[in-house]
Image (tube, helix red, strand yellow):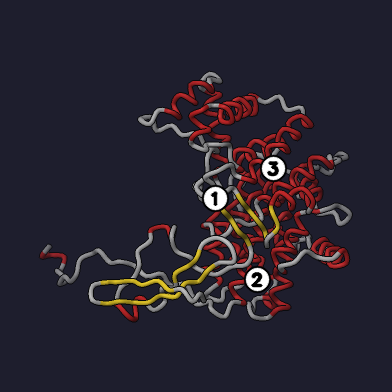
Amino acid sequence: MSEERATLNVGDDTLDLDLVPGTIGDTGIDINRLRPTTGRITLDFGFANTASCASKITYVNGEEGILRYRGYPIEQIADQSTFLEVAYLLFHGELPTAAELASFTEEITHHTLLNEEMKKFFDAFPKSAHPMAILSSATSAMATFYPAFHNPVDPYAVSQSMIRLIAKLPTVAAFAFKKSIGQPYVYPRNEMDYATNFLNMMFSVPTEDFEVDPVIARALDVLLILHADHEQNCSTSTVRLVGSSRANLFASVSAGISALWGPLHGGANQRVLEMLAQIHEDGHDYEKAIARAKDKDDPFRLWGFGHRVYKNYDPRARILRGFTHEVLERMGADDPLLDIAMKLEDVAMNDEYFVERNLYPNVDFYSGITFRALGFPVRMFTVLFAIGRLPGWIAQWKEMVEDPNTRIGRPRQVYRGEVLRDYVPAEQR
């Protein structure tokens, strides 16, 4: 706690409130004594001004375009690290030694198989089932195979749950995709790295050889790294809230996946491709789309430009831009939607209207077109986001469980309904 204090005057009540400074960034005002002392509460729609926790995991500064995992700049992490090393960093707070990383990677590699009984689970879904529905359901169902690992205060149980989720979620995602297109499931391969193994399960078939381009695998690994955590967003807050009830890690992550499914959160990169398709159907007229986006009276919106948090250039987009162009060149993509995307990017980076308003292409813009170039169908985009965000969800859940200040989440409300009414029988209404 800081020696400085804030003073709140409410009617005749005066309340001195402690300040809780961050090591960097915002300082919190501790209002725990507000309601017991004054009988009043705060009202903050969307919790945009309210910190629900004190965390050591991720720092975001939207004004300056900064993103750091455990203090490490995202630029360094994306350039030098791997997704599994980032997962270890988020879980444990420090980068692993070579031996620690090798052990961590080996343990994950040897837990990628699903229990064979789970194949019946996939078979029960209709072919048209959205892969996010399957992913969320399968994550929750996974808990039934590991009842010994449910205790959130048992370090061994938590560790084993963490390993199994990181290991098995790509397998679940790939099985969900194969189910949707009527192809046989492809089992994981222990000799492959994380991203390569996932691409192999997604796109190989038993009837012919398939080789994953290492450049493409690295691009996917970086995409996952860039999505690994982003502070207290909707899905992460959901994971924490569910976990505050002492729900097991599988159930908590399943809830986070459901939150991510929402089009205003994880579905943004899918909206980018839907927008590009709309422009294509309108005669490939991207200039018309730009004009509509500038017209304040037109409800049309350019998805993938600007960001709620970043008032500057999204640092993840800056990194991903180079990979996106490399992937497009590597794949030799001849795709009208990707052509439109590149023209929109050129306008947004140079048009005064966009530059003045900091409406730069964001991570959703580049991830959407990169996923398409890699061959992923649009319905898998949010699933890929979930695989990337999984280490952050787990790290945030673990931090929440270990924090002695954690209490079960129970927001207050300001009631605005009827005060008191007498019941009237139906025949008298």
Left or right side of 390 for 278: left
| Marks 1 and 2, how far apart at CA | 40 Å
Disc 1 or disc 2, which is closer to the eye? Answer: 1
Task: Answer whether labels 1 and 3 touch (C-beta < 8 Å).
Answer: no
How many discs mark residues in the rendered view? Answer: 3
- For mark 2, what is the residue? 144
Local packing at callout 1 (Cα closer than 10 Å; few below 14, some 14-19, many 20+) is some
- For mark 1, what is the residue? 62
Residue 326 against residue 408 in the figure, above or below: above
Q: Position of residue 325 (x, y in %)?
A: 72, 32
Label 3 SS: helix
- For mark 3, what is the residue? 319
Q: Residue at x 70, y 78 (%)?
A: 155
Label 1 SS: loop
Give the amino acid at mark 2.
Thr
Q: Residue at x 89, y 54 (%)?
A: 191
The answer to whether residue 123 of the structure is visible from this angle is no
Q: Position of residue 190 (x, y in %)?
A: 86, 57
- Mark with earlier residue (1, 3): 1
The quarter holding residue 257 reads bottom right
